[in-house]
Image (cartoon, rainbow, N blue to C red):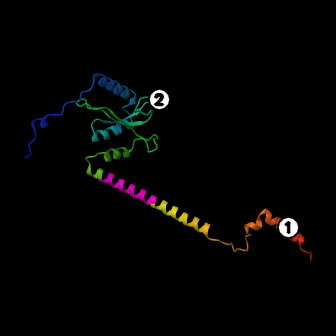
Amino acid sequence: MLWTPPSANLPAPAPKVSREHIETTAEWESLVLSHMHQSGGILDHWNEELRKIDRNLRLMQAYEGVSIPGVIAGFYHLVRLRDPSRQEMLLIVPLRDPDGNFVEPTSQMLEALRMCDLQNEQANRARDEAMLRAEASRLRAQQREEECRRDEGVERFLAASRTQVLMSPDVRWSQNNSAAGRRDRGQRNKSLPAR
């Protein structure tokens, strides 16, 4: 049995937060929530699923033309309402594709939430495997790039160090096709006696 001091069993003291900060946070939360569609149609369907994951998790859509920090006008947002019994902030995450464009809510949203669960061993394994695959892919791409650069260097060296003569009768030599070459041929033709 491990001895712990009596103070270790006490609940952690609540952090001291200024009244002004609490009031400002509450104003911001009410402003955000008042500028979002919270129910209807697709929102009701997904909110049922989200409550199974976390009772405070909701899907909301910001009104068009909204200009609030952390909120993108017209986009769907995952919103985690704060628990009144704990001092935590409202969490807002806009749904968007990797390029930052608008997306409709799909089951990928739920899968992404499950993959972010740090207590889920399966999610942790999948995240680790994805990181390993990405690193292996990056290394393969780097290796291919190095091989291409090495091959190009060899080709450039050989082109600069070897003399090559084109032996095809169909193609004239470039010095014969130059203006000086044509001029010389013309003068030679004139200086030859006519037959």
Q: Which mark is residue 151?
A: none
Residue bearing the label numbered 1 = 186
Closer to us: mark 1 or mark 2?
1
Mark 1 to mark 2: distance in Å? Answer: 78 Å
Residue bearing the label numbered 2 = 65
Residue 146 in picture, x, y percent from top left: 48, 61
Residue 70 in picture, x, y percent from top left: 40, 33
- Residue that appears at 25% across and 30% down: 87
Question: From this viewpoint, which residue is outermost toward the left?
Answer: 1
Q: Inspect the magenta stretch and tell me whether residue 58 lies in it.
A: no
Residue 69 in picture, x, y percent from top left: 41, 30
Which amino acid, by three-letter code, is at mark 2?
A: Gly
> Closest to the observer: 91 or 7?
7
- Name the secondary structure under disc 1: helix
Disc 1 + disc 2, Cβ < 8 Å: no
Which amino acid, by three-letter code, is at mark 1?
A: Gly
Which numbered disc, 1 or 2, marks the residue that appears first in the sequence? 2
Secondary structure, magenta segment, majority class: helix
- Name the secondary structure under disc 2: loop
Which quadrant, please, contains the C terminus? bottom right
Q: Which residues are magenta?
A: 125-142
Q: Is residue 189 left or right of residue 16?
A: right
The answer to whether residue 53 is above or below residue 21 is below
Q: Is residue 24 left or right of residue 84?
A: right
> Closest to the observer: 86 or 56?
86
Circle 1 residues within 10 Å: few <14, some 14–19, many ≥20: few
